[in-house]
Image: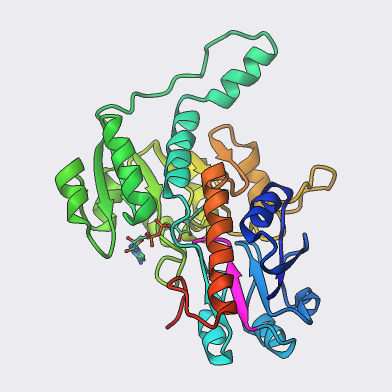
Amino acid sequence: MKVLIFSARNFEKEYLKNSNNDKHKITFTLDALSSKTAIQAVGFDAVSIFSGDIACNNTLEKLKDFGVKYVALRSAGYDNVNIRAAAILGIKVANVPNYSPYAIAEYAAGLLLVLNRKLIEANNRVKHFNFSLDNLVGFDLNDKTIGVIGTGKIGSLMVKIMHGFGCHVIGYDITENSSLVDSYNLKYMPLETLCKTADIISIHVPLNTETHHLIDESLIEIMKPGVLIINTARGAVVETSHVIKGLKNKTIGGFAMDVYEKEHDIFFKDLSNTIPTDDMLITLNVMPNVLITGHQAFLTKEALTNIAETTIYNLDCWSEGLKTENELYK
Ligand code: NAD
């Protein structure tokens, strides 16, 4: 099959080439898929996309016109693809549902430690031979209460990790996992109660119509003053402007985000020589109690290997006229 790999970054090309082993004729482009760049897919059977590519109805219609029959996501989340439109157009879409939940959960725990213990500021000081400890006070995680929103593959590992730190773990999910209750004494509760009770909140739900701006002003207002919020899920699960308000009025004591609701066109690019124009991001970036990384939680060797292998596996199935169990509509 001829496959155009959009948003192909240097860090993943070798993994994809190795997994492909010359089976498919793959072409890389750094460009993200959009209605403007879809034209590049003329003559290809399949495209592969990542979380910053937009496969909206309009783009999918163009892909269909250009002869593209398959979309292989290199991500678990698929909020950037109009699955309904793809189904109507007969374009098959598959994701990589389980590439490494460890990569994300470990990263979320890492963000929490760095945020709470102010490690970036501490390291910056030491680089300048400033060994003062003033304003670097954090808190013990032991005996604190962490609320895990979404206890699926990633969230359940976060439950396990935080239980290991001696935290009381509370959770919210539309589907409860009794093994987490048995193994880690996880207590499920309504979202409002979780928000009122937690010292730390870590978000692990997918972005969909129900979770869009799930964490908004009405919930932030009832949170414990000084709560730390960690978001490694999708930016738009939180209403960012309301989080900024919560940081300004000190309800939120710290915010770590690996994802941002307007990350499209910003993340994965070197914009260091441009004037920043996104006011919310500028505001967040200057706050000392905000830690931002550019959608990096998945970036481990194991995750990249699994992403590449599953992406090529999905393409293999389609080229042999078979279904893959990773297809997003049946
Ligand atoms: P998963 O499907 O295993 O778990 C998601 C959980 O959320 C499920 O238990 C589900 O029941 C729950 N859920 C869904 N809708 C809900 C709602 N409306 N209210 C409450 N709970 C709800 O997914 P996962 O593998 O754990 O991944 C979670 C998300 O993490 C992905 O969808 C993706 O957006 C994000 N992610 C981010 C990165 C990154 O690099 N930052 C990498 C991978 C995944």
Name the residue: 60% across, 19% down. Answer: 123
Q: How is the image coloured?
A: rainbow
Name the residue: 64% across, 51% down. Answer: 15
Q: Please give left or right for residue 158 compared with residue 37 in the image.
A: left
Q: Residue furthest right?
A: 273
Name the residue: 85% across, 43% down. Answer: 273
Q: Which residues are magenta?
A: 69-77
- Where residue 280 appears, as percent x and y from the top left, is 63, 51
- Where residue 204 appears, as percent x and y from the top left, is 40, 54
Res 325 quadrant in image: bottom left
Q: Is residue 73 magenta?
A: yes
Q: Please give left or right for residue 227 compared with residue 190 in the image.
A: right
* Of 11 and 116, the residue lying toward us: 11
| Above/below status of 191 relative to 34 | above
* Of 52 and 292, the residue lying toward us: 52
Quadrant of the rendering where the N terminus is positioned: bottom right
Q: Please give left or right for residue 169 compared with residue 16 in the image.
A: left
* Residue 135 visible, this angle: yes
Instruction: Classify the position of ligand 1 by quadrant: top left, top right, bottom left or bottom right.
Output: bottom left
